[in-house]
Amino acid sequence: MHSGKYIIKLCLLGDGAVGKTSLVRRYVFDVFDDKYLMSFGTKVSKKKVNIGDSEIDFMIWDILGQKTHESLHAAYYRGAAGALAVCDFTRPDTMRNLKSWLGSFRSVVGDMPVLILGNKSDLEKAFSTTELEQFASGVGCRMLETSAKTGLNVENAFKEIGTLVLGAD
């Protein structure tokens, strides 16, 4: 693994209401609020972490989930070193739509690391973890189940994408 200091731009991708903002709030501030707040444009949060011998400043770009604003998305993606692509376990269409999110992200940044997150794992699932694993494998990504509400794997998700960006496995 590389050592040193890094500033890493990460994008959170996915449809509206999948929990992107909640994941960022849980990770950066360790809080959860179940009131839905629609993101407009993009919101950038910063968190300093250590992964191995590396000190990382994550610049986390929480990108609005409405595909009608897709023309803006390309500008937000520029300079990203990786992404967390988020779907909602209670809405199967959000997993299928990740293919489009990944396509537009990769068309701008190339083959940067992406980690698929199945969020809201604390709720009754409309599709299985196995289905999400198969989807992730099919698009060349790893996946994790997360819950912004309980905190399940939120820290692990950011650590894993940071490790992937740094080139360690």
Image: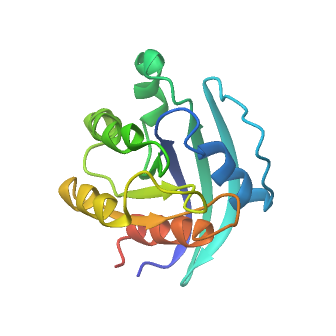
Q: Nearer the viewer, residue 28 or 139?
A: 139
The quadrant the N terminus occupies is bottom left
Quarter holding the C terminus is: bottom left
At a point 61% along the width and 50% down the height, the residue shown is: 59
- Examine the image and state in which quarter residue 149 appears: bottom right
How many numbered marks appear? 0
* Display colour scheme: rainbow
| Above-or-below relation of 166 to 131 | below
- Pick whichever, 85 or 91, lies toward us: 91
Residue at the image position 44 percent from the left and 72 percent from the top? 163
Residue 115 screen position, x and y as percent: 40, 59
> Left or right: where does residue 150 sit relative to residue 70?
right
Indicate the quadrant where residue 134 lies: bottom left
Residue occupying the point 46% across, 57% down: 117
Q: Position of residue 10 (x, y in %)?
A: 51, 50
Q: Position of residue 39 (x, y in %)?
A: 66, 29
User: Can you give x and y, in whole percent of width and height, for residue 6 in the image?
Assistant: 55, 63
Using the image, determine if residue 24 lies above or below residue 18.
Answer: below
Please tell me which residue is depicted at 59% across the width and 45% down the height of the picture.
20
